[in-house]
Image (cartoon, coloured by chain):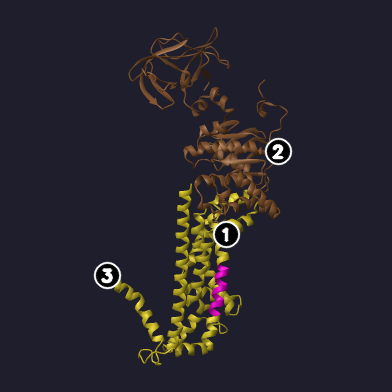
Chain colours: A brown, B yellow
Amino acid sequence: MAESVFAPWNDPDEKPLIQFRNVTKRFGDFTAIDNLTQDIYAKEFFALLGPSGCGKTTMMRMLAGFETPTDGQILIAGQDVANIPPNKRAVNMMFQSYALFPHLTVADNIAFGLKREGKPKDEIAARVAEMLRLTKLERFGARKPHQISGGQRQRVALARSLAKAPKLLLLDEPLGALDAKLRQQTQFELMDIQEKTGTTFVIVTHDQEEAMTVASRVAVMDEGRIVQVATPADIYEQPNSVYVADFIGDVNIIEGTATPGSAGYDIAWAEGQSAFHAKSTRDFANGQRCFLAMRPEKVAISTDEPDARNKIAGKIIDIAYLGNISTYHVELPGGRMMKAQTANTRRLSRRTLTWEDPVWLSWTDTAAVMLEG
Amino acid sequence: MVSLTLGFAFLYLPMIILVIYSFNESKLVTVWAGFSTKWYGELLQNEAFLDAAWVTIRVAVVSSTIATVLGTMAALVLVRAGRFAGRTLFSGMIYAPLVMPEVITGLSLLLLFIGIGLDRGIVTIILAHTTFSMCYVSVVVSSRLVSFDQSLEEAALDLGCTPFDAFRLVTLPIIAPAVISGWLLAFTLSLDDLVIASFTAGPSATTLPIKIFSAVRLGVSPEINALSTIMIAIVTVGVITASLASKRASTRQQAEERAAMRTS
């Protein structure tokens, strides 16, 4: 048997740690959060993902206590936090700019929150040492923030926000200032630390890869609303809207009209072209407008006509060689473009496909997701 | 090169002459009669000057300290509070005394003190100096606060500080250089002030600038030269020390940042 999967959101007996109940936040005329309801469970690594201005940072700042909702309620561990100031919340935040205190050493930065609790000195020292070890900063305790590198500063910020062992840790674009390699490495460190400490993490990011890598669930946001909340795999494979499909990864979107058929639906998408076939968990009426969302890696490309239910001939316009994969931009009859991806699994394969080649694209009935809009 | 020399001569020649003549043996200011430090000795015997100097220093210390506290508070409100009704009026009123002619400030304060029946003396000078130097402090401090990363204060709150603790433990240490230079500015303004002090001073307390000014009206004595030389020396030493200290701090910070880059 498979070991039990971490999915408290599917367990009706599980009590959520954080509850947003019909929360609205307005700044003057601008509605940052629009009647939002969402539960987040203990020990989750919850990612808020969206373009800038979608309200993700506002959600986080409301959890930290720096903003108060205009309407609705936020509950943390069942308690309404509306009247609890930031310094009284068992919530800590790691700031985008790190916000390290420049006049204090690394160790004093980490000890800052503990000192405010009035803990005994030796206890504080022990906790600081533990945090330094956890973030691999043992050698830098006596340095000032300007005496360490960007990656180290980021780890100090993390250590400082974890020092008080908060129930909930908020991370505001924590890795934005790091270069790609360091970021990837830190993402894994973050997951590791999250598992070790058992803290609930809520991370705000606009980097979809980051959200997919670290999160147990991803919430895709748009204009103050959560469009979809799901595991990274579900977000990618079963987006619930064109917005989500388009926001996460690369996708081909084909608009058409659905007709229920023997096994699934036939989708008429252009005059004079044979219909595509797709299965759907959603029901569509006869003649309903629909969108087919199809990931490029699920589209096969070949020179000979394949034996498949969905196939179409086209011409290669562009090839993007990315080392591990190649993406082909193929022009279909009528001028529509479609992307197909192949993995370059062999080092010295014959790459027979080149620009202007006539090719066939094909995919299975389950390759595409049918969406209403 | 010539113009530079001329410019510096224009700036510093009068002071150099003053310093030279403070060591003049003769009682006549314009006639050189040999080197002597006797005027410095006489200055130390002159009770009136010493009293005035003592008053000036007390006024400067007290008024610049009060002005620093009030000016910093005003700067915090102006920078932080965002938009509130009357914000423009408030900030305009803070900065107005900067451009107000001193004579008017002095006169209006005089009328006020007479109006409320406050006897003129050291207290009234302190009040007057606090009023106008507070504006300078708030200008200096608010220019630093504008570039202050507010998330630092939020981080302090987030880690359990009360708003006052956040200010005391995080904001104040970081803006301290600006607060200190605001204090120094207020201190020198107060030391320097003649006009406002002469409106608000009473028979019980006279500041050094007033004393010098009234003494000079009876003729420039070498004693005044000696006194001025001492003041020039104090100011020069202060300015040089401050600039050396800040230069050292900034070069050390840069060296440390470079070191951090290498070890990363």
Q: Chain of mark 2?
A: A
Residue tagged 3:
B1
Residue most extreme to the top: A262
Mark 3 against mark 2, which lies toward the viewer? 3
| Numbered mark located on residue A77 in the image | 2
Co-location on one chain, circles 3 and 1: yes
Q: How many marks?
A: 3
Mark 3 → mark 1, Cα distance in angstroms: 45 Å
Co-location on one chain, circles 3 and 2: no
Q: Judging from the image, what secondary structure is the residue with disc 2 in?
A: loop
Q: What's the residue at 43%, 22% (across, down)?
A: A344
Range drawn in magenta: B55-67
Residue most extreme to the right: A13
Residue A68 showing in the rendered view: no
Few, some or many C-alpha atoms within 10 Å of disc 1 (few <14, some 14-19, many ≥20)?
A: some
In the picture, measured across the screen, residue B261 lies left or right of residue B111, that is left
Mark 2 → mark 1, Cα distance in angstroms: 35 Å
Q: Quadrant of the N terminus of chain B?
A: bottom left
Question: Mark 2: which amino acid?
Answer: Ala
Few, some or many C-alpha atoms within 10 Å of disc 3 (few <14, some 14-19, many ≥20)?
A: few
Few, some or many C-alpha atoms within 10 Å of disc 2 (few <14, some 14-19, many ≥20)?
A: some
Residue B73: percent from left, percent from top: 57, 61
Q: Is residue B59 magenta?
A: yes
Residue tagged 1:
B172
Dominant secondary-structure state across the stretch colored magenta: helix
